[in-house]
Image (cartoon, rainbow, N blue to C red):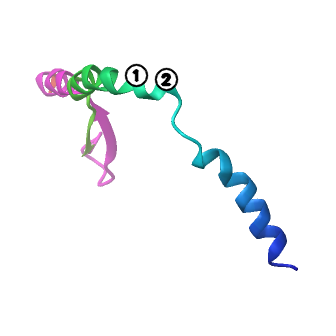
């Protein structure tokens, strides 16, 4: 009996997950191709950088490709 109640609760919660995909998600397949190219251009690149030369500690900095080009021209 102790096991039956949690199993029934999980089964009741998982029913919406087993339902079919709504029509909105089916249309998003076409949009993802356009967004994939936009995201690849805006993809962030993360690097660890020493912010001051007196410290051994490095900080994580995430910038886009264009941001790194600007950052490197300033150094």
Q: Is residue 73 left or right of residue 26?
A: left
Magenta span has 48?
Answer: no
- Outermost residue, front side: 20
- Badge number at residue 24: 2
Q: Position of residue 50 (x, y in %)?
A: 26, 45
Q: Is residue 75 above or below residue 48?
A: above
**Label pair 1/2, CB-CB below 8 angstroms:** yes
Q: Position of residue 34 (x, y in %)?
A: 26, 19
Question: Residue at position x 54%, y 39% from top?
Answer: 20
Q: Is residue 15 left or right of residue 28?
A: right
- Helix, strand or loop at label 2? It is helix
For the residues labelled 1 and 2, the Cα–Cα distance comes to 5 Å
The residue singled out by tag 1 in the image is 27
Question: Residue at position x 51%, y 36% from top?
Answer: 21
Write the start and end of the magenta stretch as one range. 49-73
Q: Quadrant of the N terminus?
A: bottom right
Question: Residue at position x 59%, y 43% from top?
Answer: 19
- Helix, strand or loop at label 1? It is helix
Magenta span has 67?
Answer: yes
């Amino acid at each position: 009996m102790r096991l039956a109640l949690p199993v029934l609760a999980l089964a009741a919660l998982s029913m919406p997950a087993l339902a079919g995909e709504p029509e909105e998600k089916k249309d998003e397949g076409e949009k993802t191709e356009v967004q994939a190219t936009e995201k690849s251009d805006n993809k962030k690149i993360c690097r660890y950088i020493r912010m001051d030369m007196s410290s051994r500690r490095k900080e994580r900095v995430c910038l886009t490709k264009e941001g790194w080009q600007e950052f490197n021209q300033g150094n």
